[in-house]
Amino acid sequence: MSVVPLSTLDLGIASMLVVALAALSVRIQLGIARQLLVAGFRTAAQLFLIGLVLSSLFANAHLGWVLLMAGIMLAIAGYEVMRRQQRSFGGWWGYGLGTVSMFVSAFAITVFVLLVIIGNHPWYAPQYAIPLLGMILGNTMTGVALTLDRLTRNAWEQRNVIEARLILGDSWSIAIGGILRDSIRVGLTPTINAMAAAGVVSLPGMMTGQILGGTPPIEAVKYQILIMFMITGGTGFASMAAAWWGARRLFDERQRLRLDRLHGEAD
């Protein structure tokens, strides 16, 4: 079964859904019409651009180009993690916390799956490596952003409680332990919900795309299960690493709470 091609006119008709939503938002004064239209334009432009890049990359499969593409994806994901936090760490710490956590988790899991489970030759074949890394990075980015945002906001709001526990003799890890665990749970919640609803409430994107492309449903299901497990592992390990490093950064070597290391909106 071949894929039904979509014309520019088809996509233009589909874009009317976003235009209609923007018009309705103006009518009820939501104030998001411009954001919707800009986001819609960016979606189309960015996806067409990545389509051209991937077409060239697939035609010239080389480890160096794959690593360059992966590095760009990681750099952008790290910036998005920092940007999505109400209160973030200043300087390179603000960027590095999320980026390093995602690198350690997402890249390790992607390489493991490519080498051990899929076993394609070459192992870095871009038609496997880039989509798999993209899916795991996108979800891990959301988990890490939610984790760090909850960690820093709760630490700020509960600073008096933390300092009281430090005065009573608790170590930094105990004083902030409840907040740390809560932030990890928040980061993992979207992934857990997605796993719980997969196949019952929703058909995940990769599985849907493979089925539309003619892949037998059972084979598409196998790949989707693999992806869901990769996403869960990547998000969980990265969220835990980011939460621990972030929590440690909130205290100095004398175990004093240092909220001056956070940048964000004033109360």
Image (tube, grey):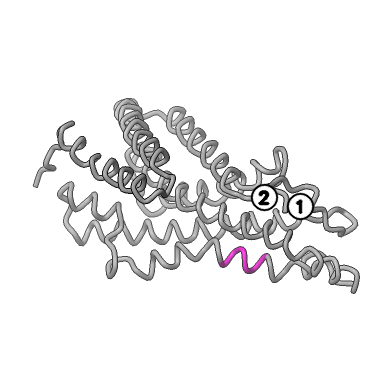
- Picture coordinates of residue 247, whole percent (x, y): 72, 58
Q: Give the range drawn in magenta.
A: 180-185
Residue at screen point 62% across, 45% down: 100
To which quarter of the image does residue 222 belong?
A: bottom left
- Indicate the quadrant where residue 243 lies: bottom right
The residue pinned by badge 2 equals 87
Query: Which residue is more in the foreground, 88 or 117?
Result: 88
Element marked by disc 1: helix
Compared with 244, 82 (above or below) is above
Whole-percent x, y for residue 228 in the image? 39, 60
Q: Is residue 10 left or right of residue 150?
A: left
Q: Which residue lies furthest to the bottom in this view?
A: 168
Q: What residue type is labelled 2?
A: Arg
Three-letter amino acid code at the position of disc 1:
Arg
What residue do we see at 48% from left, 33% from top?
Answer: 67
Looking at the picture, tell me which residue is in the foreground, 183 or 125: 183
Element under disc 2: strand
Which is more foreground, mark 2 or mark 1?
A: 2
Can you identify the residue that label 1 sits on? 249
Say which of 225 and 243 sits in front. Answer: 243
> Which quarter of the image is occupied by the C terminus?
bottom right
Q: Which residue is drawn at 9% across and 47% down?
A: 1
Q: Which residue is drawn at 79% across and 69% down?
A: 175
Q: Earlier in the sequence, mark 2 or mark 1?
A: 2
Q: Is residue 125 above or below residue 168?
A: above
Distance CA(mark 2)–CA(mark 1): 14 Å
Q: Looking at the picture, how far across and down is residue 220, in whole percent?
A: 24, 56
